[in-house]
């Protein structure tokens, strides 16, 4: 079973678009982008 964060990364890879991934995940695109930025900072 995937954590929600893993699902974010998987959906971005599938859709090849932050906007489309955010739409599929039912979250705002800026929130998804912020999550990835924070992940990269770690």
Image (cartoon, helix red, strand yellow):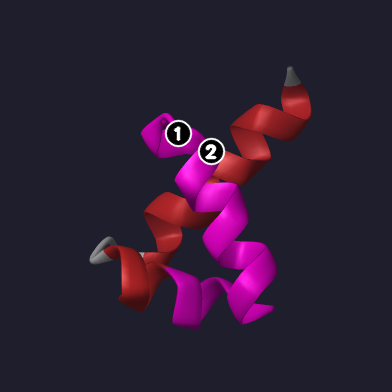
Q: CA distance from mark 2 to mark 1?
A: 6 Å
Q: Is residue 30 above or below residue 24?
A: above
Q: Which residues are magenta?
A: 1-21
Q: Residue at x 23, y 66 (%)?
A: 26
Q: Nearer the viewer, mark 2 or mark 1?
A: 1
The label number, if any, that marks residue 2 in the structure image: 1
**Residue carrying label 2:** 6
- Using the rendered image of the protein, determine whether residue 32 is visible from the camera's viewpoint: yes
Membership of 14 in magenta stretch: yes
**Side (left or right) of 41 relative to 26:** right
- Using the rendered image of the protein, determine whether residue 17 is visible from the camera's viewpoint: no
Question: For numbered disc 1, what is the local secondary structure?
Answer: loop
Please state the horizontal and vertical placement of residue 15, each as a whole percent of the image: 60, 79
Question: For numbered disc 2, what is the local secondary structure?
Answer: helix
Looking at the rendered image, the quarter that the C terminus falls into is: top right
**Side (left or right) of 2 relative to 42:** left
Please state the horizontal and vertical placement of residue 40, each as a whole percent of the image: 76, 33
Q: Is residue 20 above or below residue 36?
A: below
């Amino acid at each position: 079973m995937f954590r929600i964060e893993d699902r974010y990364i998987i959906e971005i890879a599938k859709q090849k678009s932050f906007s489309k991934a955010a739409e599929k995940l039912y979250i705002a695109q800026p929130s998804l982008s912020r999550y990835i930025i924070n992940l990269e900072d770690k």
